[in-house]
Amino acid sequence: MDTLTPSDLEFLRRPLHGFLTVAGGQPRPVWFEATPDGTLQLFSEPDAPKVRRLRRDPRASIVVAAPVGERERWISVSGGVSFETDGAHDLAERLAARYWDLSDPARAADLKEILAAEQLRLVLHPEQVRRYEY
C-alpha cells in the first residue's frame, strides 16, 4: 500500500479540482479534502451516478494537477472507497469555504441548497499513489 507524503498532503490542501474516476464512468471534476491520516474525502448526494457505480464496485481514482502557469506536478491516488453517513455536511461547508467566496450571495445560496439535501461522505483509501513533479 502506498501512502501520501507530507509534501503530497500540502499540495492536496490547495483549492485544486480533483478528477474522480469510478468503474463504468467518465472522469468528473470534484472537490476533495486530504485528511491528516492520508485519506481523501468528498461528498455526494446518495443517489448520484458515481455513488451507484461505487456501490457496485467500490474502487476509484482521483488525479490532481497543478494549474497552468506553475511547474508541472500531479498526484494520482487509487483505492477502495467507503461510504460514511456522518460528516458530509461539515465537509461540504469546509470545501465550499475553500473553493468559493461565500460572501457572494449566489455562492452562499448554492451552499444552502447543498446543505438542504442529503449528503454522503465518500472516503478514498489510498492503495496506490503515483506522483510527478518537474
Image: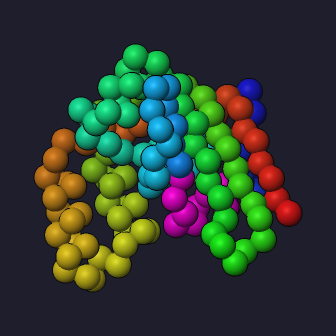
Which residue is found at the position 32% from the left and 42% from the top?
A: 44
Which residue is found at the position 37% from the left and 52% from the top?
A: 91
Give the percent coordinates (x, y) of residue 7.
75, 58
Colour pattern? rainbow
Whether residue 2 is visible: yes
Give the percent coordinates (x, y) of residue 78.
63, 33
> Which of 35 and 104 lies nearest the eye of the viewer?
104
The quarter in which the C terminus is drawn is bottom right
Give the percent coordinates (x, y) of residue 11.
67, 61
Which residue is found at the position 80% from the left and 53% from the top?
A: 132
Placement of 16 over or under 82, stated as above or below: below
The residue lying furthest to the right in this view is 134
Placement of 32 over or under 27, stated as above or below: below
The residue lying furthest to the bottom in this view is 103
Q: Is residue 114 magenta?
A: no
Which residue is found at the position 37% from the left and 72% from the top?
A: 100
The quarter in which the N terminus is drawn is top right
> Which of 67 and 81 lies nearest the eye of the viewer?
67
Q: Is residue 10 magenta?
A: yes
Magenta highlight range: 9-18
Q: Is residue 97 left or right of residue 104?
A: right
Give the percent coordinates (x, y) of residue 95.
40, 60
